[in-house]
Amino acid sequence: MNVTQRRQPPRQQSAGDVMANPRLTPNKLFKDARVRLFGSREALADAANAHLGAAFILNANDIGKIERGVVTCPRPPRRAALRLVLHANSDAELGFSGKQSPTLPADENVPLEDSAAATASAGRLPVMRRNAISAARDADERIEARTSLESALDPLERLAELTDSTVTDQRLENVDRMLRGFIEEYETAGPHDVIPRVRRQLSWTNAALSGYERPRHIESLYRQSARLTGMLAYMAVNLRRFALARAYCVESFGLAEFIGDMDLQAWVRGTESFCAYYEGDFKRAYELAVDGEKYARQGPQSIRLIINGKARALAKLGDTHETRRAIDKAFAIATSHGIKRGMSPCLSFDAYSDARTMANAVTAYSSLGLPVEVNELLVELAPTVDASDSVWSRSLVRLDRAKVLLAAAAPEPEEATILAAQALDISAERPIASVLIRAREILAGAEPWRDLDTVRQLGETLKECEAR
């Protein structure tokens, strides 16, 4: 993908070609049985789990997906357990359909563990038939497979605990390796799992700095402390701890300034802009990004500052002309630096990749209500996002698409709210501020159609996610 071609005339794909928007039918039979016999979703999940193996454990979010019609035919072990605890003699009594789910091909509903035939069948499933939501499910299953073992960070942490705490070249190299691990793991584990690890490592680097160390190690320790604190700032934003995020940014920027690391200072300004954006202070978000450009000096950090900071803030402020200029400039700088392909990790200290840059451009254009530009980018972006391990990227792209559908000259509130509910379901296990805030914006925009079932379902789904 050549980013210099971003301004070419749009392809003639329809909205439906870009992102699937299946209509969901709530499962009233199942919900009524759950309310009558167990009350809460958590209670039903606990009862069913007593009859399930570890690979099929249910949670309240899984029960909610069945009730909303996101999942119409749970996997066989789950169906059997639910029939048992809900005193049902057949799948039909619980509203389970043997037909294809609106979000999953029928043959993907069969667990690979059921039989050798099922395994062979699943192996023949053509990749191109998988739609956006089934790709998301594939990624979630890869995550589950990984988390059934140790994290790749565990051995490094054990090594740090069991060996001498004295600063050495090897120890600093191991810390850098852990930093890379935090960045990669955050995409699938989320802030709650990664924050404790980052804080433990920050405690070690700060303790090392407070003692006598070799001069050649000091700069590395300061840089590692600045990066760890910056990570905490970014994750605090996603937990809606904005005041704490700002405080971490002050600390991180000060450490980076102390060692003269201007690229890291630029990264911190980008994170401060990110924080202000989700606080709703778009003017401040723009100003912080502009200040960050002084430190980036047209280098790789400029891409993030311009596309994530300036362009998105300008779009929220309604300045279409300057938003377009910012987007074009970000793509031009990306081209000059040999931008990487794919979806770069959101916590990365490296330059934005092509997909990350496009995703932010989509957000800016969607805020301006420009469907042609959004659809043009989504045609190229959707396959990369759906193949990514980042559930948040998949959620956010769908929310951007939903926003455009809602703001169109001929609004499509049903499709928009269905797509927004799907976005919440994709990342429901790891809800973050950016997803929740944008979903609430869509729900507010759908207020004129509040009597629609899909609008009410979006409100219910959002409430569940915000309560997590």
Image (spheres, grey):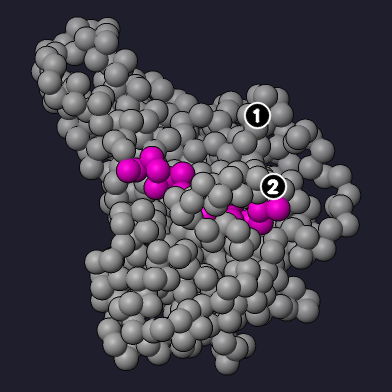
Does the magenta segment cover residue 108? no
Residue 364 visible in this rendered orientation of the protein? no
Q: Which residues are magenta?
A: 129-148
Q: Is residue 345 above or below residue 399?
A: above
Classify mark 1: residues with Cα within 10 Å, few (<14), some (14-19) or many (20+). many
Does the magenta segment cover residue 141? yes
Residue 87 spot, x, y in % from top left: 33, 84
Question: On the image, numbered disc 2 is attached to which residue?
Answer: 126
Quadrant the C terminus occupies: bottom left
Q: Is the stretch drawn in magenta largely helix, strand or loop? A: helix
Q: Earlier in the sequence, mark 2 or mark 1?
A: 2
Residue name at image x 14 percent, y 24 percent: 161
Q: Secondary structure at mark 2?
A: loop
Q: Quadrant of residue 208?
A: top left
Residue 274 spot, x, y in % from top left: 47, 49
Residue 23 spot, x, y in % from top left: 65, 76
Q: Nearer the viewer, mark 2 or mark 1?
A: 2
Residue name at image x 27 percent, y 84 percent: 38
Question: On the image, numbered disc 1 is attached to which residue?
Answer: 339
Q: Quadrant of residue 8?
A: top right
Residue 125 spot, x, y in % from top left: 65, 48
What kind of residue is marked 1? Ile
Residue name at image x 32 percent, y 91 percent: 36
Q: Quadrant of residue 200?
A: top left
Quadrant the N terminus occupies: top right
Residue sitting nearer the eye, 73 or 419: 73
What kind of residue is marked 2? Pro
Classify mark 2: residues with Cα within 10 Å, few (<14), some (14-19) or many (20+). few
Residue name at image x 52 percent, y 58 percent: 110
Residue sitting nearer the eye, 169 or 16: 16
